Image (spheres, rainbow, N blue to C red):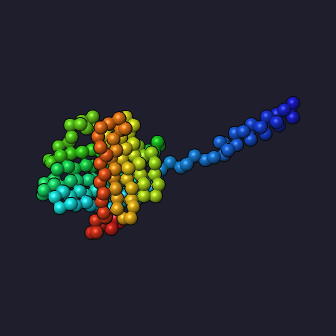
Amino acid sequence: MSMLLTIFAVTGSVLAGPARWAAAPPPPELGDLAFLVGAWVSDDGATSMREVWDPARGDAMVGHFSIVSEEHATLYELMTLERDGRGVTLRLRHFGPGLSPWASEADGALALSLVEVGEGLAVFEDPAREFPRRIVYTLRDGALSAELMAAPESEREAIVLTFSRDVGDTGD
């Protein structure tokens, strides 16, 4: 009987070995998103966009985005990155002039989960949302891009925003 138990124990541990031994990757941390910190600008002369992210404090990072077109503020966006037991969630809320909330967000902020992170890369997704289904941040050669992507079945086009670091802001 002990020989049978030994064979079972060895066979079972060999078969389950790699799956049992492989460690799950650690959940993303806010520190993985430090590349976002600072002020980012885009200005084509007629329209100016600015996105600012504060460093992580506790379990959150806070950011804001604005668009000024022809000398008039047309859009404000408040953003948070919050870490909880499940991972990191990007929440954002849009406002018009006078801080009038968008009617399309009457039920609450948009919430997208961090599904991929790497050096200079953060991918957020809400599989139930048509637009934006995904928001992909990338930092390459000192330029920050935010690509807002629609669901595959949507007729909406992706929006790509490209920013350079505000020379007056060091991100500290």
In the rendered view, does 110 fall on the left or right side of 17? left
Q: What count of labels does the image hold?
A: 0
User: Which quadrant is the C terminus positioned in?
Assistant: bottom left
Percent position of residue 66, x then y: 22, 53
Q: Residue 144: which quarter of the image? A: bottom left
Could you tell me which residue is drawn at 82 percent across and 33 percent down? 5
Residue furthest to the left in view is 71
Could you tell me which residue is drawn at 17 percent across and 50 percent down? 74
In the displayed structure, 125 sits above or below 61; it is: above
Q: Residue 38: which quarter of the image? A: bottom left
Residue furthest to the top in view is 1
Could you tell me which residue is drawn at 14 percent across and 47 percent down? 98
Percent position of residue 132, x then y: 32, 42
In the displayed structure, 108 sits above or below 143; it is: above
The answer, for residue 67, to whether it is visible in the render is yes
Percent position of residue 112, x then y: 37, 42
User: Which quadrant is the N terminus positioned in?
Assistant: top right
In the displayed structure, 8 sits above or below 158; it is: above
In the displayed structure, 26 sits above or below 107; it is: below
The answer, for residue 80, to whether it is visible in the render is no
